[in-house]
Amino acid sequence: MRRIGLTGNIGSGKSTVAQYLRQLGVRVLDADQYAREGAEVLKAQICQAFPEACREGQLDRTALARRVFADKEARRRLEALLHPYVRRRMQEESEKAEQEGCPLLVLEIPLLFETGREATLDGVLVVAAPRALRQQRAMARSGLSEAEFAARDQSQLPQEEKIRRATWVIWNDADLATLKARVAHWYREVQR
Ligand code: ATP
């Protein structure tokens, strides 16, 4: 089974690419989904480490995000709690896919290069877009302010560096129909 990473900076269009790949029949694992699952499973530890992001034992994910994107050290502490869980879940699901005879597995991992995951993969597809477009999309989707977008973007490796390390790059600088066509083209290429 080939295992290909899918990454890109905030607002680049990773999840949209993942969705188009699923429509083409590709199995895709989503690190964000396991991070959300992990935040629930590890709620007690997270609340202990970040009491300001918890109310009556319930995690306030918005407050937690605000805290960790404003403070590098806090982000590291949260990642130290969550990343091992996310890795384990992705490993489990990856083994399951392999046992089921899946020929190609795509792993959508926002912090793929930042967490040194490329070494374990057969290639990395980077989704890239001009910063202004990424900002516009992220702000429209999540209601982030310009400053919040900038803080999140700066917490990631620069896009140029990801492009340099990529096996393939899909530019998402046009409309959604164009993106869909580029994804289909990429999929045909990797199947050869
Ligand atoms: P994040 O890292 O913030 O989770 P992402 O890289 O997964 O973002 P998406 O969620 O796929 O990015 O896209 C961000 C927003 O931009 C979504 O609302 C999506 O529908 C929209 N979008 C993505 N590509 C395009 C495009 N080519 N034209 C118009 N809107 C787009």
Image (tube, rainbow, N blue to C red):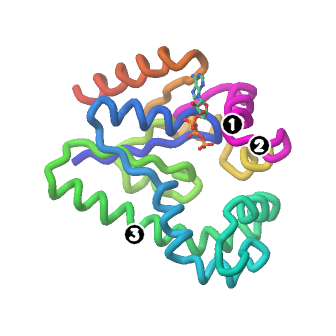
Q: Nearer the viewer, mark 3 or mark 1?
A: 1
- Residue 134 lies in the magenta-colored region: yes
| Labelled disc at residue 144 | 2
Amino acid at the residue labelled 3:
Arg
Q: Is residue 11 left or right of residue 178?
A: right
Q: Are marks 3 and 2 in contact (CB under 8 Å)?
A: no
Residue on which the image places disc 1? 138
Check disc 2 and give the amino acid type.
Answer: Leu
Question: Considering the numbered disc 1 on the image, is that residue within a helix, a strand or a loop?
Answer: helix
Question: Callout 2: few (<14), some (14-19), or many (20+) C-alpha neighbours within 10 Å?
Answer: some
Circle 3 SS class: helix
Secondary structure under tag 2 reads: loop
Crowd band around label 1 with a 10 angstrom C-alpha radius: few (<14), some (14–19), many (20+): many
Mark 3, Cα crowd under 10 Å, few <14 / some 14-19 / many 20+, is few
**Looking at the image, which is closer to me, 169 or 92?**
92
Residue carrying label 3: 88
Q: In the shown orientation, is residue 89 left or right of residue 97?
A: right
